[in-house]
Image: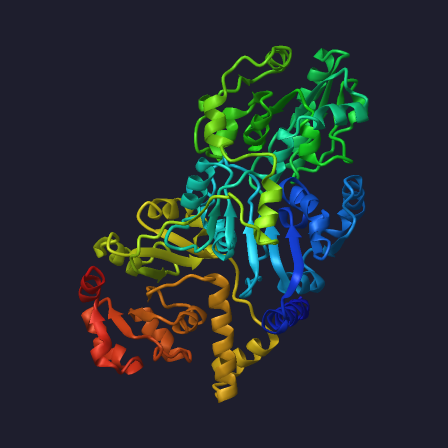
Amino acid sequence: MKLKKLKKKFHLYRKNAVLDNYYTDLPLEENLIFIESKNGNDIAGNIFYILKELSKKEYSTYKVVISLKSKLWDTKRVLLGNYGIFNIIFTETGTLEYYKYLYSAHYLFSDATLPPAFVKKKGQIYLNTWHGTPLKKLGKANAKRGYGLGNVQRNFVMADYLLYPNPFMQKTMISSFMLENLSKAMIMNEGYPRNSIFFDKNAVASLKSEMGIEDKQVIVYMPTWRGIYSDLDIKGQNQAVKKYLSKLDELLSEEQILYVKLHTVVKDQINYKEYNHIKPFPRDYETYHFLNSADCLITDYSSVFFDYACSGKKIILFAYDEEEYLKTVGTYFSLDELPFPQVYNVPDLIKEINTSKNYEDTPFLEKFCKYDNLDAAKNICEYLILNKENDIPLKNIKSNGKENVLIYTNSLNDNSLKKFFNKADFSKKNYFLTFRASKVKDNAERLYEISHKLNYIPLHDNLTVTIQDALAIKLFFKYNISSNKIKKQLDRFYKRNLNKYYPSIDFDQIIHITGHDKQIINLFARYPSQKTIFMHKDLIKKLKKEKITLSYYDQVVLLKRNLLEPALKVYPKKDKIIKLEDFIEKLSE
């Protein structure tokens, strides 16, 4: 078992070394475009329509690479071929080839996140479209899962452009991922590329005729997934859907067809041959292209209703498990605030299916579909790639001009942190708490409370270590061997990880409150700003045992007066040692 772990670690270090070389040595290919949808699990929505736009002759000199899990290559090649999209290079998500393209591409498009190990290079242009206007609470707004937002937040900070198709999404995403005073990305107020199809008046009749369903009422059912992404009850969700589908099938007429599309993360295990009026969502058509042909959409808590509303057709919310669902997943607003009819059982659902649209949704469209239009994909690609001036509204994310201060803690229950919180004035500067996400996972509600006082940046994974890094760390810390070469390698290692965790972020000051982790002490020691570390008894003991230097830190804060003498043994700059009260007073100036 030990040998197996060592081999696994060695392979990871070797891969990290290759990625580091890609970052430092690979030149950017000016005409290379890298695209990824849902972390390589699909080609759909915004990404599909961007691909479709890039297949036009104006982009014939560009090379387009799509990241996709290899098991999907055959079906997605057929799908793309159906739309005349052929000149696309497929790469297996997560492989060295994948990273080679990722680090070589001039243009990057994602509707989710690029991987935790990736750091955007200077000169790359990154557009993050995200994958929908949120109903379910995300980021820090999610009281139970806020600690896990690290890589999403990091991607939004790395991005050059963030696409927001409506003012609600803009406000909600920036707040939930704490981007003010943090991200330098430009806000792009343009419609979602995938929603353009709803403005194509000829597309519906053409597709229905092609499928031979022009005389049918087409209904689409698109429920969202339940539970936590890391612990999905796929079997349970399939069983729940089957139960309702059987009842629906009995009540649908011969003139009605219900197409079912379960969420991407839920593997569809339904045998559709059991039904007379229910069919699986057709695989040969892009999701939104076929959705546009529907006369009615049934969904629940999925953001798809924000998009489908552009069509002007009827939406029904089948929220059969609303009370249970909302216990685990919070929403930004109540379903009662939506104009769409809500039903909780099959008879009422059938009644609504058979009733024409009878609600007013103009205010909803103004709030949630404000920028959607026919030419969204065209406008975006022309602006980003062809450098054509157009009318896309662009704006900066707000910054109040105050200093940014980063505070590291090892635990939300640390006494040092509590003392600081009790005395500090958080109104004078922009404070961001940072921590290893794994350390606060079991204290999510405490983090949610803290988020009302200051924003935070979770460290989403472990430090990225190469073979050379591992060797330098071992020689320096374990065997007390030092040389200029080893010191340079360590400097490179820590600076690379700072760039990974805090890309393009400027902090005027770093405050290291809990110093139990030598790697974190050394990490922040390399940050190019004023650095302060809190001194407490446990840290003094640790400094004596391990080879940790505080020489990089500009000052030391004493939590207790009787620590002055032992502190001087590990940090001999007496004039740079300060009491907590004096330090907080200086911060508030």
Q: Is residue 428 visible?
A: yes
Q: Is residue 77 above or below residue 492?
A: above
Q: Nearer the viewer, residue 231 or 392?
A: 392
- Image-quadrant location for residue 246: top right
**x, y percentage for residue 139?**
46, 45
| Quarter of the image with the C terminus in it | bottom left
Question: Which residue shows up at 49% across the image and 50% down it?
Answer: 148
Q: Is 428 displayed left or right of 124 in the figure?
A: left
Q: Is residue 260 visible?
A: no
Residue 454 is situated, as x and y percent measured from the top left of the image, at 33, 51
Which residue is at a point 75% across and 35% down the rendered structure image?
Answer: 285
Query: Count of labels shown?
Result: 0
Above-or-below relation of 166 to 409: above
Observer-nearest residue: 332 or 160? 160
Quarter of image, res 205? top right
x and y percentages locating residue 337 in the rendered image = 44, 23
Going 47% across and 41% down the picture, which residue do you hit?
138
In the rendered image, residue 474, in percent from the top left (x then y), is placed at: 53, 79
For this rendering, which residue is in front, 47 or 268? 47
Q: How is the image coloured?
A: rainbow
Split into 4 quadrants, where in the image is the N terminus? bottom right
Apparent side of residue 272 relative to residue 195 in the rendered image (left or right): right
Q: Is residue 572 above or below residue 446?
A: below
**88 sits to left or right of 554:** right
The residue drawn where x is 60% and y is 49% is: 382
